[in-house]
Each structure stands twice: as structure tokens, then as C-alpha cells.
Image (cartoon, rainbow, N blue to C red):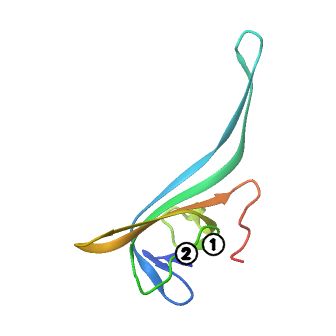
Amino acid sequence: MAYTRGVLTSGAGGYGYVQSISHNNTGEELLIKDEDGITQVQDLYDERNEVSVEAKWDRANTLPSRGDVLTLAACPLTAMNGFYTVKDISVNEANTEAGTISLTLTRYIDGDLPASGS
């Protein structure tokens, strides 16, 4: 599955038209304080990029599953391009409009995981 020019696609076809995409660079923080409560050491670890995508869902296609690898290309922030693991999936449907899917995708920067589309 890939994101290119506003469309989520798979090898067989499109998942739907992207309505919004947001990027977040996050990680965990280690703080070590001395006996007076003053922070002496700060370290950031487990750094990762998280991308949230909302798209109108093309029901002709099977939804991705948690753990599937998605390729982001042609993103406005080119540093966000690459392979991502599908972390969360949400499907919203209504009688009056097309269904939408919301995906949360993760790529770990420290280990560059997932390393490829396989």
C-alpha cells in the first residue's frame, strides 16, 4: 500500500482519497535527578515518526491490517517519506456519506524500522 498524491493505494487498487494527513515526531524521555531534585541527565530514546491519515474508503478494496507495511511517498514533508507499520485502524461509516478510514502509522527512527516494504 502506498500514499501518492492524495490517494492511498495498494498493488491491486486504491484504498481511497486522503482527506487529511498529519505528521508527528515523538519519543520517550529519560530524566535522572540528583538528591535535590535537579535534573542532571536528559536523554531522548525510542524516537519515531507517527503519521495519521484519514481517507474516504473505497469499499471495493480490503482494508489494511495492523502490522501491514505502508509506503509513504510524495509527502509534503519529504523527511516523512518511507516505510511505515500500520499501528491502528478505525473505520467510520454513515448512511449519508462515504465511509472513512483513519490509520495511525509508525516508523522507528533509531532502528529505521520497518526497513523495507517486506
* Residue sitting at x 62%, y 66%: 84
Q: Callout 1: 10 Å neighbours few (<14), some, many (20+)?
A: some
Give the alpha-carbon distance from disc 1 to disc 2, as whole Å. Answer: 6 Å
On the image, the x and y values in percent for residue 85 come to 63, 66
In the image as oriented, which residue stretches furthest toward the top?
36
* Residue sitting at x 22%, y 72%: 96
Q: Secondary structure at mark 1?
A: loop
Give the residue pinned by disc 1.
68
Marks 1,2: beta carbons within 8 A? yes
Say left or right for 106 vs 31: left
Q: Nearer the viewer, residue 37 or 87?
A: 87
Q: Which residue type does callout 1 highlight?
A: Asp
* Residue sitting at x 42%, y 87%: 60
Q: Nearer the viewer, residue 37 or 66?
A: 66
In the image as oriented, which residue stretches furthest toward the bottom?
12
Give the residue pinned by disc 2.
64
* Quarter of the image that includes the N terminus: bottom right
Q: Callout 2: 10 Å neighbours few (<14), some, many (20+)?
A: some
Seen in the picture, residue 92 relative to 110 is either above or below; the reply is: below
On the image, the x and y values in percent for residue 20 come to 39, 63
Q: Quadrant of residue 65?
A: bottom right
Say left or right for 102 vs 25: left
